[in-house]
Structures are given as C-alpha cells and as structure tokens.
Amino acid sequence: MSYLGEIRQNMRPLAAASIGSGTSLPLFAYTNSVFAPHLVEEFGWSRSQFALVGLTMLTTLFILPFVGRFTDKVGVFRIAIIGTIFVPICFLGYAAQQGAFWHFLVASTSILAIGSLTSPLVYTRLIAEKFERATGLALTIVNCVPALLAMAMVPALNWFIEDYGWRLGYIGLAIMTLIGGVTAILLIPPESRTIKREPKQAPDKPIAAGENVPDYPATAPVQFTAKQDYSSILSSKIFWLIFIGMFMCLLQTPLHASQMNLMLVDNEISMQTAANIVTVYALGTVVGRIACGLALDRYPTPIVTTLSMVLPALGFYLLATDINTVAIITFSMFLVGLSIGAESDLISYLVARYFKLRIYNTTLGLVYCVSFLASALGALAISFTLKLTDSFSPYLYFVAGSIAVGSLLFLLMPWSRDSEKVG
C-alpha cells in the first residue's frame, strides 16, 4: 500500500483520534492560559501562588499508568466514553468557583485526570493499530487539530471572556468538548471498539524486527502480567533515554501552558497582544508537527527528535533577555511552538517505534508521567523564582540550558529501523 493510500484507507480511525484528542487536554493547554490573567485579576491571587497550579500534575503520576494499562486491556472505545461524559462536568466545576484557590486546584486536578481518558494517551492507539508507513504523518494530523482550533479560539475566547465573563467561557468549553467527544466515539471503527480474545497465530508474511506494524494478532489479549510488562519496560535502556531526555526538555511546560499569558505580559505587553501572540505560537505548533511527522517517516528517529526538541532553548533565552519588542517575543514563541508541536508527535511515535503494540498504552502512560512530573516540578520552580525575583527571567535562562542538554540525549537512541522492539 502506498504512503498516502494508507492515510486514505484509515480515514475513519484517523478522524476519531484527531477529533477526540484534539478537543481534550492538548487544546486545554492553550485555553487555560487565556483564563489565567482574568482569574488572577478578579480573585486577587498572586502570580507566585497561581504558578502552584502546576503541582496538580503530580496527581496524574498515579493515574496515567492505570489509564494506559486499562486501554491496552479494554480498548479505546470504553475508556473514551467515560472521559467524554465527565470532562464537561469538570468545566462546569471551573465555572462555579467563587475565588477559593483550593477550588481552582481541585478543578484543575480533575480536568487533568478525566481529560487523560480522551487524550492522545488513549486515542493514538488507533494510529498505532492501523498505520505502518505513514505513522508520523498520521500522528501529525492528530496533533495538529488542537493547534488549529487554538489559532481561531484563543483570541476569540479572550474577547468573549472580556465581554461576557470567564464563567460563560468555561460553559462554552464544556459544550464544545461534549460535542467533540461524542463525534469521536461514533467514528471509532467497530473492529477497534473491543479487544477480541483470540488465540495467537502466525502472521501471513515475515515481519522485520523493527517494522512498525501491529503485533500478531493485533487483537490478541494481554497475556503477560503487569509485573512482567513493567519489568520489561523499566529494564530497557531506550525507555530511560526517552524518560530523562523528555524530563529535561519538558521542564518548560508550565511556561507555555498555565503561565504563558502571564509570562508574555511580564514583557510589558497588553493581554490582547499576548493573546494574539499565542495565535502565532499555535501556528508554530502546526508547522512543527507537520515538519516533524514527515521527517520521522523519512529520516533517522534520533536526529529528528534532537533537532525538534532543541528549538525552545533559543526561544526561552530570548524571552529572558531585556529585548522586549513584540517582534522578538513573537519569534521566540514561534520557536517554542515548533518544538511543542513536534513533542506531541514524538512521544507517541517513539513508543510506537521502540515498543510493541501489546504494551503501547502501558508504556505511553509511563512516558506521559514524565511530562507531568516535569510540569509539576517546573511549576514549583517558577513559583519560587517569582517569589524571590518577581520575574520569569531566571527560570527562562535555566530551562534554556536544560532543553539544550536534554535534547542531545536522544542521539543515543537506536538509529536502525530494524532494531528489536521492547516487549
């Protein structure tokens, strides 16, 4: 089957994964920062206090491994239904808050936990199951959806909040996520809605050791214990290279999530200008995803990963300096966007590339843990920095160096596509 032919044949699962994860956590990373200045202004929270919201990500460390494991066992369909029902309720919880910071923390924790049930952690299994040659391109399409939505939504959402209030903004997001989730569930192909319990059988053709195809049979039940699977994953060198490299690169996560607009306003620009720059950032994520996805299908994985992840080092360094022109700030956020777009593709691709489908979601759940761990520790460091200096600059300098070092670790991953997969 041709490269584009594989895309055409699997349009339905591709659409399901794109819409399902595109109206979930990846989109919320953009919209959360829009609400931040308005909530801080209305409730009188300090910036150092608000930065602590990133610590809510620590709770996901106990949730994501279970989400990944259960997705391997029961399939995307059942997990996504639960998330689709409860994510809108979380947004209604946001809308009901009265100024107690603990209420905001509880709502943030809930949206992270429940949103993971409709996130790429779950939905990208459809891509791992159906794609072989065009895996990178398929993941690019999936991960471009939230960025494309954000390009239109972020300035409009900021305008809507200023005119009608942030409570109605949260209610609007609840309605949108419900519609997107139901649509995605209906698009999941019937054969992907359950994990069939069939005996193992031999494939019809020889399979190269590193070929990116489903394990045979693709519908086979999990036949190893959780202890055996986690032991296999945690004893592999490739897992720890991905884990440590991603940790160092993703310490920047709070800066482009909950703190983005506050960080940009710190550079002496207006809230509307900051919202407009977020649109350019979102454009960067689209460009980064397309470039990274196409490159992953054509060039060695380690070099593509390194080049994709190192870009924010320059962007955050420029933001840390006193060069506060709108052009420099916009260019810096575009560089950050390029890498953030690539990051979404890379995490799923690296797991599909180096680990067997049988443990795809189990492994992906562990890898996502590192992103949330880095986010939580980054949020704590940002809060400490703001309390001491009332400026983002010291942390921006630190994270620029961390990204540069972490990116180089990916060069140690296996380069050959014939390398044996873990599991």
Image (cartoon, grey):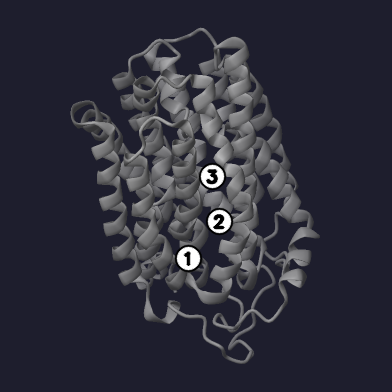
Q: Are marks 2 and 1 in contact (CB under 8 Å)?
A: yes
Residue 114 drawn at (x, y percent):
46, 55
| 382 or 316: nearer the viewer | 382
Within 10 Å of disc 1 (Cα), the crowding (few <14, some 14-19, many 20+) is many
Seen from the viewer's position, the closer of residues 58 and 34 is 58
Among the 4 quarters of the image, the one containing residue 232: bottom right
Residue that label 3 marks: 343
Q: In the rendered structure, which disc, 2 or 3, sits on the residue that comes first in sequence?
A: 3
In this rendering, does residue 216 appear at all?
Answer: yes
- As helix, strand or loop, the secondary structure at mark 2 comes to helix
**Residue drawn at x 59%, y 27% as measured from the top left:** 313
Tag shown at residue 348: 2
> How far, Cα to Cα, is label 2 from label 3?
9 Å
What residue does disc 1 label?
Answer: 127
Secondary structure beneath disc 3?
helix
Give residue 416's mark. none
- Residue 387 vertical position relative to residue 259 in the rendered view, above or below: above
